[in-house]
Amino acid sequence: MKNTVVTFKQAKENKEKLTMLTAYDYSTAKLMDESGINGILVGDSLGNVILGYEDTLSVTMEDMIHHGAAVARGVKNALVVVDMPFMSYQTSVYDALCNAGRLVKEAKAGAVKLEGGEKVCPQIKAIVDADIPVMAHLGLTPQSVNVFGGYKVQGKSIEAAQKLIDDAKAVEQAGAFALVLECVPSALAKIITESISIPTIGIGAGSCCDGQILVYQDMLGMYSDFTPKFVKKFANAGQVMCSAFLDYIDAVKSGEFPSKEHSFDISDDVLSAIYGGMKK
Ligand code: KIV
């Protein structure tokens, strides 16, 4: 069944958990879609896990469109949400609207995601007014890493917790259809989830959120640079891949691969004609 913003709304009303994963390419997105995931986020985390940057700040609109379009081509039923990269919406409401429009037109996004609370509500409102659904993102917002001074749990003081609650209400009011809560204490995520009518999608925000999201390389054990506390490895695909790479190298070096089974034949007539030709 096709997932839309309506599916997300109904899931919260019916207390059904929503599932999301990140993806950045056609074949991975297709596998996730076939598994029945509700939503796929083409996250700007692609800066880390695909492009090897230290943070997400260097990711461009072109990167997001390139990977977003690949994911969209692999998906039939999941809602495809594409991240708005750093400086594609902070600069002005006009820039935000134009760039959100590009993600829909060129990457075939079903919705866009941007980071921030009250500060970016004019942008959220303008994008939603143009009939583009917006997913908001609060808590540890990686585009603000230089202000946070690192990747730290957010909302731990009274002021910070209250600000997160206020920001959650503000993005709901501005028209966001869902809210990602990243690295927020579980009890605070529960309060926020119960204070707003739009679904919360948690990552490091405990079990009371309306849904969960993980970066797929993290949950498959494919990214060893850094593993946050909130990541559960559902498989060790990294190990499986390394062992397959080793087997391949051995098989090529020993001449075991490619065997006849993986090679193409040519008729004897053609072969002898060529050999004959070579002798002349
Ligand atoms: O970019 C991303 O992958 C994200 C998720 C971690 C929510 O924003």
Image (cartoon, grey):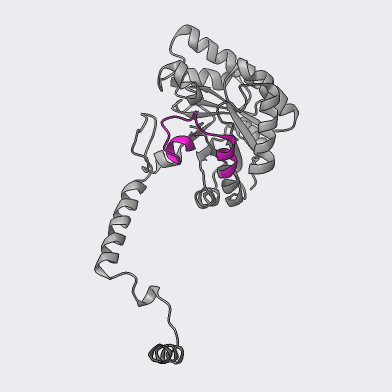
In this view, which residue lies farthest toward the front? 280
The residue shown at (43%, 27%) is: 204
Corner quadrant of residue 200: top right
Closer to the camera in the image, 19 or 254: 254
Closer to the camera in the image, 161 or 53: 53
* Residue 1 in the image, given as x and y percentages of width and height: 63, 48
The residue shown at (70%, 35%) is: 101
Q: Is residue 58 magenta?
A: yes
Residue 76 can be seen in this image:
yes
* Residue 102 in the image, given as x and y percentages of width and height: 67, 37
**Image position of 165 with respect to 276: above or below:** above
The residue shown at (65%, 19%) is: 121
Q: Which span is picked out in magenta? A: 45-66
**Image position of 130 with respect to 262: above or below:** above
Image check: 124 left or right of 137?
A: right
Closer to the camera in the image, 268 or 207: 268
**Image position of 265 with respect to 95: above or below:** below
The residue shown at (59%, 37%) is: 82
